[in-house]
Amino acid sequence: MIALFLGVSFFAPFAGEQWASKFIILLCILLIVSFGFKKDIYKSIFNKVEIPFWVFLLTMIGGLAGVKDSAVAYRHFWLFIFPMPFLYFFAKTAFRENSGRLIIRSACLMATLVCIYGIIEFLTKQNFLYTYFTRNMYFEVFKGRRMMSTQLHPTPLGTYLVAILPLSIALKSLEKKIFLKFMSRIYMAIIFIGIILTFSRGAFLGFFAAMLVMVVFLIKQKKWLYIWALILLSAIIIGISSLCFPSARYSLQVLALPHSYYAKLCRIMSIGPILRDKLFWGLGFGHYRVFFDHYLPRLAGYCSYDGKVADCMYITILTETGIIGLSGFLIFISFLFMRIRNRLRILLKNADRLLLVSFLSGFIGMLCSFLTYDGLYWVAPSYLFWSYAGILAFLSGPKKATG
C-alpha cells in the first residue's frame, strides 16, 4: 500500500504509458501471489457484495463497441479502465486496519513532500522534472501562477491533495507520540496550502465537501459551529484571492465572468444530441474530444484540442459509455455508500470510525472535484479513486462490532 502511494505521488503521473502498464502488471502479480497466502482473498473478490463492481466493469467494457477511432478508445481503455479491478481489489485485499496508521502517515509525508516541491516551483517558477526529465506543455502555461509539482497539471494535483488532507487530520488523533502529533499538524497545514496554490475550483469544491463529511460524521457537539466556520473559511479564501490574486480561478472577478458558464452550458446541452445518437453505449472512450466539433460547433473554433473535453467526469461517463455505463457507475457507488452507512451505524470505537470517515471524506472530495474535469482520465486521481474505493470496501465489509 505504501508503494502504491509512493508511485502515485512521485512517479506514475509522468512515467509514461510503458511504465504505467508495468506498474499494473506488478499489482496483478502481487494480487495473484496473495491468493497463495490468504485463502479468504478469493471470497473477497468473487462474492455477491462485489456484483455492482463487476456490473460496472462490464458496462465500461461496452464503451469499446462501435467506436469511430479505435486507437483513441483502446488507449483510454488500457490506461484508465483496465487498471480499475487491479487497483480496487489490490487495495481491498492489501489494506489492514492494524497498519492503517503507518499507511496514512506515509501517504501524508509523501503528499507533504509533493507540496513542498510544488511551493518551491510556485515561488521560483522552476521545476526540474519538466525542464530536464519530461516534457509538460502545461508547465509553461501555469508556472508561477498555479502549482502542479509532480502531477503534470494543477487540477489533478488538487484532487490528489484533497484526497490526502482528511488523512492528515485523522492522523492527529491516531498518533500517540507528541512529536508525531506535531508532524501531523505540519502535514495538514502544508497540504492545505498546496490545495490553495493549485487554484483549482474542483479542488476547492472537493476540500469543502471533504471537510463537511468529517464534521458531519465525527463532530458530536457544536456541529453547526464547525460548519459555519468552514463556510467562513471558504469565504475568506475567496475574499483574499479576489484581493491578492484577481486572476485566480476562484476569485470573484473570475467567477463573475460569463464565458466560462456559457462553455459549461454548451457542454451540458451537448448531452441530449449525443444520447439521441448513442443512447446505450455512448460515443466510446476518449471520443467526446473526437466528436467535439460535431456536437459543439459553437465552441469548436474557440477551444484548443486539449480543451475539447466535457469538463465533468460524469458528463464524460454518460456521453462516452451511455446510460448503461453511467448506470453501472451509479450502482457501484450507491452500493458502496450503503455498506459504509451500515458500517458507521455499528462502529463504536473512535479509531475505527475515524479511519473509515477519513478515507470516505477523501473519496467524496474526489467525487466532487470530478464535477469540474475528467478526473478518471488522469493517472493520480484515477489510481487514488479506485484504491480508496477498495479500502472503503474493506473497511465497510462484514466484521464484528467493535467497542
Image (spheres, rainbow, N blue to C red):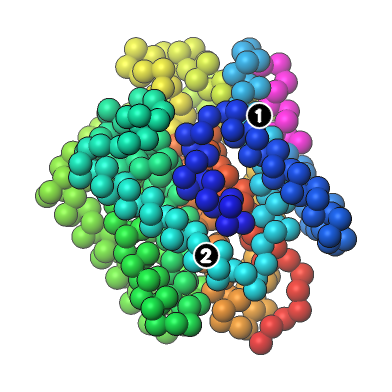
56 or 124: nearer the viewer = 124
The residue at the far front in this view is 132
Q: Can residue 354 be seen from the camera position used here? A: yes
Specify whether residue 28 is painted magenta. Answer: no
Residue placed under numbered mark 2 in the picture = 104
Q: Please give the label number shown on residue 180.
A: none
Q: Element type at marker 2?
A: helix
Q: Which residues are magenta?
A: 58-67
User: Residue 315 at x, y = what percent?
Assistant: 52, 34
353 or 293: nearer the viewer = 353
199 up-or-down from 209: above or below: above
Q: Can residue 155 be seen from the camera position used here? A: no
31 or 328: nearer the viewer = 31
User: Residue 105 at x, y = what percent?
Assistant: 49, 66
Amino acid at pointer 1: Trp
107 up-or-down from 375: above or below: below
Q: Element type at marker 1?
A: helix
Q: Residues within 10 Å of mark 2 (few under 14, many from 20)?
A: many
User: Residue 144 at x, y = what percent?
Assistant: 21, 38
Q: Quadrant of the C terminus?
A: bottom right
Q: Please give the label number shown on residue 78.
A: 1
Q: Is 342 left or right of 356, judged from the image as shown?
A: right
Query: Residues under labels 1 and 2: Cα distance?
Result: 29 Å
Instruction: Look at discs 1 and 2 and give the one toward the viewer.
Output: 2
Q: Quadrant of the N terminus?
A: bottom right
Amino acid at pointer 2: Ile
58 up-or-down from 101: above or below: above
Say how many tags the image has: 2
Q: Residues within 10 Å of mark 1 (few under 14, many from 20)?
A: some
SS assignment for the magenta stretch, majority: helix
